[in-house]
Amino acid sequence: MPRLESVALLKSVEDKMETQRFLHEKDADETSKALSDMRLAMLRLLSTEAYETRHMELQRQVNDLRESRSEITGKAAGTSALWGYMVAAAGIALALISHFIK
């Protein structure tokens, strides 16, 4: 093979190798960016799941506290009503006794 033909063939191979290297670097950069984007998306997803889990737990605790407060308020109202009935009964009894004693 003559020298000029060898040089041309070598130059052609070097150009193809340079093109392939450029394309490979470009693909590697795109792949790296895609992996970075996927990592960020996964972190957001994990933090979103953790947030939702914690939010549901807090919501359950708030509902439990609300129910507990309702029970306490109901007991207090019942106790107040009982005292009111007892005072009313005592007042009626005193009124009847004072009516018959006259």
Image: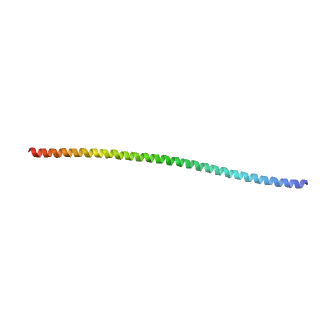
Q: Residue at x 47, y 48 (%)?
A: 56
Q: Residue at x 73, y 52 (%)?
A: 24
**Side (left or right) of 24 relative to 97:** right
Residue 43 point in image, percent of width and height = 57, 47
Residue 51 or residue 78, whichever sits in front: 78
Residue 11 point in image, percent of width and height = 83, 54
Q: Residue at x 76, y 53 (%)?
A: 20
Residue extending farthest right? 2
Residue 31 or residue 90, whichever sits in front: 90
Residue 81 point in image, percent of width and height = 26, 46
**Side (left or right) of 99 relative to 27:** left
**Side (left or right) of 58 relative to 29:** left
Q: How many marks?
A: 0
Residue extending farthest left? 102
Residue 62 point in image, percent of width and height = 42, 46
Quadrant in which the N terminus appears: bottom right
Protein image colouring:
rainbow
Quadrant in which the C terminus appears: top left
Q: Residue at x 78, y 52 (%)?
A: 18
